[in-house]
Each structure stands twice: as structure tokens, then as C-alpha cells.
Image (cartoon, grey):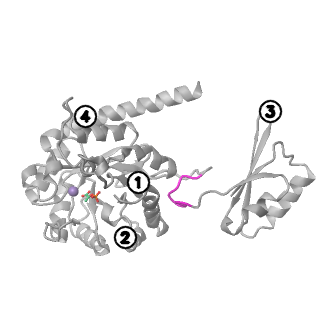
């Protein structure tokens, strides 16, 4: 809670002394005073830190010198970006930094199908200087008769192959807390040749028991996908569930919203929320162009829709791109129609670099104009 004092409130006045005496009596509340002395006036803000829910805004308002009271949002307490918040907005994993200022591409298989495809995918990534990938072993599917992923049966060879190609992190969805143990066991079994970023998919964004279980471990960071049919606020609160259980290494993933307003894209692309999530929280933000666009449609300029939306997100400062590739899309068991081909990887990465450069230039321009 913040108390904004009357203009020119005088710290040596009797009134001011009475205010401070009253604040000192508040149990468990720390009082921090910020006084900004300008040319025309002095602004004094008093920060009340602690369990301020118990305080009545009306009673605070009635104290001497108080002009108005601001109740700082209780939302996203740990992951949120609060006023005067100097906590870092990054974390490190496997020697890589994930922050609101970095960018990593996680190109890879939507679902692991064969060891040969994992090998070809990882080799292409290594050739193109990539150290992160996506590989789904546990796949939530709309139809119970569709391929659900190889599960723990593929983990050993996936970790092994990835490690041999210098892959440091694999984004891998978990749909049940037991999958976390299976991943941990398989990593130990294979000598931890790589790392895993646990992914919570859009169908599980509000699976609170799964969130709590994944939040209780701190070994693996988490990519939480936004729920495709809930508000942004609800999805950000889902991320806060992870942090409230102890794991604040969370990346927030935008992946499109379920509505026919986005047709003919598979989902309505919501990448305009990249700066919004960065403003509201300290989480790095990821976009998934594959599951939002859902096809290989190409614009008349020769650029795939999928690459257009990726570039839009990167130019807006996104920190991670999760994208489906496949060495032989017609043979993919999941989401073949939206997969990019390995021959397109170099072009995709070049397009990302161009957009990133544009973003960095945009930040510089903003600084210049802001100063002027
Ligand atoms: C995925 O990334 O494989 C996936 C299923 O994504 P989403 O949960 O966003 O549908
Ligand atoms: Mn998919």
C-alpha cells in the first residue's frame, strides 16, 4: 500500500510526526518513505510493506498529511512486476539465461515418433548452431484414439541423442505429475546429457493440482502455456501457482486463443500480448507460432504466415520461440500440416535474427526519443 502525502508535506511538522507515530504502531508493517524534491514541489510517498490487507484504506486516508491511498495490486505477488520492484526478471538454467532481455529458439518435434527423426532433427539443430529444442513425449490429444506420445519409453534415446548433438534444453510437456519423476529418472539413467524445461499445455493451464506439483520442484524450469479459452489474468494467476509453491523459473507462453475470430488460422494469434505480459510480470515470454497459426499457408510476399507471426512477436521483444519442425512432415504422428521442414530451419532462424535486430533498434530509438 502506498500513501501519497499532501504536496510539500513537511517532515519537521507536527502533523508529519503524528502520521509517522501512527504508522509505527501498525503491527508487522514496515514503513519506507520516498521523498522526491522537484523544482516546484516535493512529493512524498510512504510505502507500507507487509500484510497490508488488514489495513483499511479509509483509515489510512484519514491520517494527517495523507492526500490519497494506493492499494498495490495483490495480483501475481511473486511473478508480478510491482512498483519499486527491483527483483530480477531472469533465471538461469543449463548455463543459459532466460530473461525479458534474451531470446532463445526452441525448434523441434511436436511429438517424438521415431529415434531416426529425433536424430535428424537434432543434427539439423546442431548444424544451425542451436542448443534448445522441443520434443513431446506425453501428448494430450482431442481424440482418445489418437497417438498420445511414446511417454517414458522414448526418454532415454531422446536425452541420449540430444546430448550427443549439444542440445542443452528440451521443452517437454507433462500432463501428470508422475511424468516429472519419469523425466528425472531417465535423465539420471542417461547421465544427464541434456536438460528439460517442463511444459504445461494450454489444456492444463488451470489444472491446479498439476501446477502445484510442478511448482513444488525446482530442478526444472517451466513453460506455462496460456489457456486458450480463459482471460490473460486467469492464465497469469496459473503461473503464480507455480511460483507460490516455490518454482519461479517460469516462462509464460502465448499460443493463440480458441475462437473462430482467428479463422483461417487454427487459433486467434494473441502475440500483441507480448509487451503486456512483460509489463505486468517479470516472466520471460514465449510464443508458439505453430499451434496458433496451425498451417503452412504462405502470404503473397512469399513468407509463411507462421514466419510472419514469429517475426511480429520477435519485433515486439519476445524471449522464446517454440516451433514445430519435422524431418518428414507427412509421416509426423502429430501436427504434420503445421510443421516446418529441416530445409527451412536456416531461413526461419535468419528471419528471427532480422526481427530481433529490428527489436533492438526499436528499443534504442525509444530510448533516444524518450530522452529528447
Ligand atoms: C504443444 O506445444 O505441443 C502443445 C500441445 O501446445 P498447446 O498446449 O499450446 O496446444
Ligand atoms: Mn502439436
Q: Residue tagged by mark 4?
A: 350
Q: Is residue 187 left or right of residue 272?
A: left
Which label number is shown at residue 40? 3
Q: Is residue 56 left or right of residue 270?
A: right
Q: Residue tagged by mark 2?
A: 207
**In this view, 88 is above or below 25:** above
Q: What separation in Å lies between label 1 and label 2 (alpha carbons)?
A: 26 Å
State which tag comes first along the sequence, 1 or 4: 1
State which tag comes first along the sequence, 4 or 3: 3
Q: Secondary structure at mark 4?
A: helix
What secondary structure prevails in the magenta region? loop
Q: Secondary structure at mark 2?
A: loop
- Residue 164 in picture, x, y percent from top left: 18, 54
Tell me if mark 4 has few (under 14), some (14-19) or many (20+) residues whose alpha carbon lies within 10 angstroms of its own: few
Q: What separation in Å lies between label 2 and label 3 (alpha carbons)?
A: 53 Å
Q: Residue tagged by mark 1?
A: 92
Magenta range:
75-82
Marks 4, 3: nearer the viewer? 3
Front-lying residue, 217 or 42? 42
Q: What separation in Å lies between label 4 and label 2 (alpha carbons)?
A: 37 Å
Q: What separation in Å lies between label 4 and label 3 (alpha carbons)?
A: 52 Å
State which tag comes first along the sequence, 2 or 3: 3
Q: Are marks 2 and 3 in contact (CB under 8 Å)?
A: no
Marks 1, 3: nearer the viewer? 3
Q: Is residue 124 left or right of residue 33?
A: left
The stretch drawn in magenta includes residue 16: no
Quarter-of-image position of residue 232: bottom left
Amino acid at each position: 500500500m502506498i500513501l501519497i502525502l499532501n504536496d510539500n508535506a513537511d517532515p519537521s511538522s507536527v502533523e508529519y510526526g503524528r502520521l509517522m507515530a501512527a504508522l509505527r504502531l501498525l503491527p508487522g508493517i514496515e514503513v519506507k518513505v520516498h521523498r522526491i524534491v522537484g523544482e516546484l514541489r516535493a512529493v512524498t510517498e510512504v510505502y507500507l510493506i507487509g500484510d497490508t490487507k488488514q489495513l483499511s484504506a479509509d483509515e489510512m486516508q484519514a491520517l494527517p498529511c495523507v492526500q490519497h491511498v494506493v492499494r498495490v495490486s495483490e495480483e501475481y505477488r511473486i511473478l508480478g512486476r510491482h512498483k519499486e520492484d527491483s527483483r530480477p526478471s531472469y533465471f538461469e538454467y543449463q548455463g543459459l539465461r532466460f530473461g525479458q532481455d534474451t531470446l532463445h529458439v526452441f525448434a523441434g518435434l511436436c511429438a517424438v515418433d521415431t529415434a531416426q527423426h529425433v536424430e535428424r532433427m537434432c543434427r539439423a539443430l546442431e548444424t544451425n548452431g542451436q542448443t534448445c529444442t522441443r520434443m513431446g513425449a506425453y501428448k494430450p490429444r482431442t481424440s482418445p484414439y489418437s497417438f498420445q506420445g511414446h511417454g517414458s519409453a522414448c526418454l532415454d534415446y531422446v536425452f541420449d541423442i540430444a546430448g550427443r548433438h549439444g542440445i542443452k534444453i528440451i521443452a517437454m510437456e507433462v500432463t501428470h505429475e508422475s511424468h516429472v519423476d519419469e523425466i528425472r529418472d531417465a535423465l539420471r539413467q542417461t547421465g544427464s546429457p541434456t536438460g528439460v524445461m517442463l511444459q504445461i499445455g494450454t489444456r492444463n493451464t488451470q489444472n491446479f493440482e498439476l501446477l502445484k506439483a510442478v511448482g513444488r520442484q525446482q530442478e526444472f524450469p517451466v513453460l506455462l502455456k496460456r489457456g486458450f479459452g480463459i482471460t490473460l489474468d486467469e492464465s497469469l494467476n496459473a503461473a503464480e501457482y507455480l511460483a507460490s509453491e516455490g518454482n519461479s523459473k517460469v516462462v509464460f507462453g502465448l499460443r493463440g486463443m480458441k475462437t473462430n475470430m482467428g479463422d483461417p488460422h487454427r487459433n486467434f494469434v494473441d502475440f500483441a500480448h507480448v509487451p503486456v505480459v512483460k509489463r505486468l510480470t517479470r516472466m520471460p515470454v514465449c510464443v508458439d507460432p505453430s499451434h496458433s497459426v496451425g498451417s503452412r499457408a504462405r502470404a503473397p510476399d512469399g513468407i509463411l504466415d507462421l514466419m510472419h507471426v514469429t517475426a511480429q512477436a520477435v519485433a515486439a521483444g519476445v524471449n522464446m520461440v517454440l516451433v514445430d519442425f519435422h524431418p518428414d512432415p507427412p509421416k509426423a504422428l502429430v501436427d504434420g500440416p503445421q510443421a516446418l521442414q529441416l530445409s527451412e530451419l536456416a531461413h526461419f532462424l535468419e528471419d528471427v535474427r532480422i526481427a530481433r535486430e529490428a527489436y533492438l533498434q526499436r528499443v534504442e530509438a525509444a530510448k533516444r526519443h524518450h530522452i529528447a
